[in-house]
Image (cartoon, grey):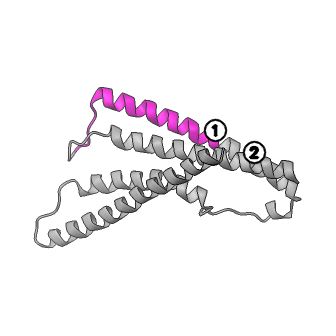
Amino acid sequence: MLRWVRIVAVTSGRFNYVACAAVVFMMVLSCADVALRLFGVPIPGTYEMVGFLGALIVAFSLAYTSLHRGHVAVEVVFEKLPPRAQSIVSAVGDLISAALFGLISWQSLAYGIDLRQSGEVSLTLQMPLYPFVYSIAAGCGLLGLVLLVDFIRSVRRGLEK
């Protein structure tokens, strides 16, 4: 179990590095496009690339953010519950969330396969769309695994107390 948790954590970190690199690339691309527009030579397809990179950034940073509890949570009522009830509520929430992101991952993968088979490409750059949909599937699948790990931890905490 510990090895599996470590693999999920390392993979989440690597996905996050890809997201960080995409942020840097998006920034450089946007700045270059704005600068070149001053000379009347904009970079074609910048708007498309920024959209694709945005999808990649969100998908690849989800698992790392969840792993490090970087999301926003309102815990006004949750903190008033006894520790055992907190573990139960947390476990149920993690399990439902893992199932939801597993479903999103599965459907994104199916949609990516459809896009690949149909050969759909972006309008300006004529870039295939399916790799970005696959990245969303991978990011959501990894988030589902992180949430499964959190579910197991919550159940263990609930059984210990």
Q: Residue at left 46%, top 36%?
A: 108
- In the rendered view, tell whether residue 105 sits above or below residue 158: above
Magenta portion: prevailing SS class: helix
Q: Quadrant of the C terminus?
A: bottom right
Give residue 118's quadrant in the image: top left
Q: Which mark is residue 135?
A: none
Q: Quadrant of the N terminus?
A: top right
Q: Is residue 93 visible?
A: no
- In the rendered view, tell whether residue 133 sits above or below residue 150: above
For the residue pair 108 and 61, the one nearer the viewer reads as 61
Q: x and y percent of residue 143 in the render? A: 56, 47
For the residue pair 140 and 153, the one nearer the viewer reads as 153
The residue under label 1 is 99
Q: Secondary structure at mark 2?
A: helix
Q: Which residues are magenta?
A: 98-123
The residue under label 2 is 92
The residue furthest front is 3
Residue 107: say if magenta.
Answer: yes
> What amino acid is at disc 1?
Ala
